[in-house]
């Protein structure tokens, strides 16, 4: 079978790595009256494959949240080469969404349930004047941040804990216990603070609440000791603010040690 042959073959599952600018999008999950990443992907795939196609995602990112490494999958009978799927989707998708990788995966792969961890990054831009360059990608704060205090507070949140105090009111997770592997603070450029959070899973708005709480510490409204008290209290009302969506990016979804394997498509 030649690389250009797109007929024949059995049922297959394809895993996509999706990058998007969440500005102007109503989040990942499809909605009837608003543009979403899932909605755009399903429309493009249905056109490319000439059949109604549904997509499952690893993370239901909120409106305004970005992604560098969102993972999604779909099933199809079409034997279109992976390069053709990636290029075809990038032709059909709007400019703020792109497919950076396509892989064939085993049938039991699930973008969400097979994941062993996720990496989110939250950006804070602190200086008196606004930055047009970072307007849609970072949270603008006009006052300097005490990064040493923020790092101390962040260390108290690392480990396996009950994060009930760091979830949104509408969170429906059956358990609020999660494990955060690392919270790292860095400065990619002057005035810009990156808060990188890696963990096994996250509650609704958990990273944004962590970022907002750390900024509260950096601006002196909370002490690092109070952050420990908030964590132990399990009370969201005692916690810090929820940072706005535009500063958050899903950097990567991990499948280390997962039960499934991915392999290049050889057709």
Image (cartoon, helix red, strand yellow):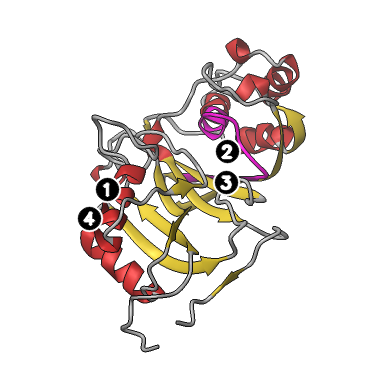
Quadrant in which the C terminus appears: bottom left
For residue 133, the mark is: 1
Quarter-wise, where is residue 25 in the image?
Answer: top left
Q: Quadrant of residue 81?
A: bottom left
The residue indicated by pointer 2 is 147
Which-is-in-front pick, marks 2 and 4?
4
Secondary structure of the residue carrying numbered label 1: helix
Q: Position of residue 68 (x, y in %)?
A: 43, 55
Q: Residue at position x 55%, y 34% from top?
A: 207
* Mark 2 nearby-residue class (10 Å; few <14, some 14–19, many ≥20): some
Q: Residue furthest top?
A: 237
**Label 4 belongs to which residue?**
95
- Compared across the picture, whether 29 is left or right of 104 comes to left
The CA distance from mark 2 to mark 1 is 23 Å
Tag 1 and tag 4, C-beta contact below 8 Å: no
Percent of width and height locating residue 152: 69, 35
Q: Are marks 3 and 1 in contact (CB under 8 Å)?
A: no
Q: Earlier in the sequence, mark 2 or mark 1?
A: 1
Asked whether the beta carbons under mark 4 and mark 3 sit within 8 Å of each other, the answer is no
Give the residues in magenta.
193-211
* Residue at image coords 64%, 51%: 114
Label 1 vs 4, first from the N-terminus:
4
Image disc number at residue 28: none
- Say left or right for 33 vs 41: left
């Amino acid at each position: 079978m030649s690389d250009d042959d797109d007929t024949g073959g059995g049922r297959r599952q394809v895993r996509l790595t999706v990058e998007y600018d969440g500005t102007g999008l109503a989040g990942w999950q499809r909605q009837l009256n608003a543009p979403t990443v899932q909605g755009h992907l399903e429309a493009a795939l249905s056109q490319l494959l000439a059949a109604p196609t549904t997509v499952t995602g690893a993370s239901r990112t909120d409106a305004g949240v970005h992604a560098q490494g969102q993972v999604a999958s779909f099933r199809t009978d079409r034997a279109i080469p992976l390069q053709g799927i990636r290029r075809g989707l990038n032709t059909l998708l709007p400019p703020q969404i792109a497919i950076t990788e396509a892989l064939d995966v085993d049938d039991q792969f699930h973008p969400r349930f097979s994941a062993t961890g996720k990496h989110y990054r939250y950006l804070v831009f602190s200086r008196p004047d606004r930055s047009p360059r970072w307007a849609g990608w970072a949270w603008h704060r006009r006052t300097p941040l005490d990064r040493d205090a923020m790092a101390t507070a962040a260390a108290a949140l690392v480990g396996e804990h009950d994060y009930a105090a760091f979830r949104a009111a509408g969170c429906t997770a059956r358990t609020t216990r999660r494990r955060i592997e690392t919270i790292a603070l860095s400065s990619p450029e002057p005035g810009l603070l990156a808060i990188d959070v890696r963990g096994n899973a996250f509650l609704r708005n958990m990273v944004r609440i962590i970022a907002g709480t750390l900024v509260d510490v950096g601006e002196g409204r909370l002490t690092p000791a109070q952050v420990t008290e908030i964590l132990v209290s399990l009370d969201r009302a005692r916690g810090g603010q929820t940072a706005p969506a535009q500063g958050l990016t899903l950097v990567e979804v991990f499948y280390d040690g997962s039960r499934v394997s991915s392999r290049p498509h050889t057709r």
